[in-house]
Image (tube, grey):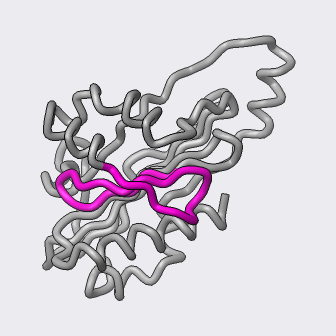
Amino acid sequence: MPRRFACGRLPLRTLSCALVGFAVACGSGEDSARDQRVADTPALDACAVLREVDLASLLGAPPDTLLTIISSASGDMAVSQCFASIETQPQTLGLMVRYSARGGNPTTRQEWIEREAGADVMGMGEEAGAAIRAAEEVPGLGDLALAYELIGPNLAVFWGNGRYQLVATSSDIANPQTARQALEAVARRALARY
């Protein structure tokens, strides 16, 4: 029987693998510049990216749930977040893609650590900070890509002249190497799409 989701009724494991350490903020500026940025804001669809990846081989079975958590565009910002899960198994993959016409992505591992390590991600305090400080760079993905362990393997990727970023998450995938390959496959699809 397919799961039905309502706000506040998501499984804890789905919510817990959501690492969204990026605040979505509204900006201001000259009206003409803002109007151009709004016209250039892309439509993002994290679920479409996940559909383009062979999730069955990554999760061990075809997902029976592909859930849009958020899909929003406002002004010069856009964000989309989606989770894939299997009702009878604990494995999940998640993807958050964000665009900001203002740019501002970190350009180095150290800059990312300084921004994120102090954030109380999901109320995890020092555990989150330690995971972020232990992140390792992943060559060949975007302008900057960082892999780290928090609840499960995670991957943060930044690209597009500082305007795009993604966080790909996984939980309960037994083999960490398989999880990392899955996250990198999801990131490659997002990079190709956007």
Instruction: Please determine whether, in this image, residue 156 is positioned above or below residue 33.
Output: below
Residue depicted at x 61% and y 62%: 191
Whether 148 is among the magenta residues is: yes
Instruction: Say how many tags the image has.
Output: 0
The part of the chain drawn in magenta is 135-157
Q: Is residue 101 left or right of residue 33?
A: left
Q: Nearer the viewer, residue 159 or 16?
A: 159
Instruction: Please determine whether, in this image, residue 15 is positioned above or below residue 138.
Output: above
Image quadrant holding the N terminus, namely bottom left
Q: Is residue 129 left or right of residue 72?
A: left
Extreme right residue here?
A: 32
- Residue 147: x and y in percent read 36, 57
The reply to whether residue 82 is visible in this rendering is: no
Q: Nearer the viewer, residue 85 or 21?
A: 21
Q: Nearer the viewer, residue 121 or 94?
A: 121
Q: Main secondary structure of the magenta part?
A: strand
The reply to whether residue 43 is visible in this rendering is: yes
- Residue 81: x and y in percent read 43, 51
Residue depicted at x 37% and y 67%: 66
Q: Is residue 159 left or right of residue 30?
A: left
Image quadrant holding the C terminus, namely bottom right
- Residue 97: x and y in percent read 51, 50
Residue depicted at x 51% and y 23%: 25
- Residue 20: x and y in percent read 35, 41
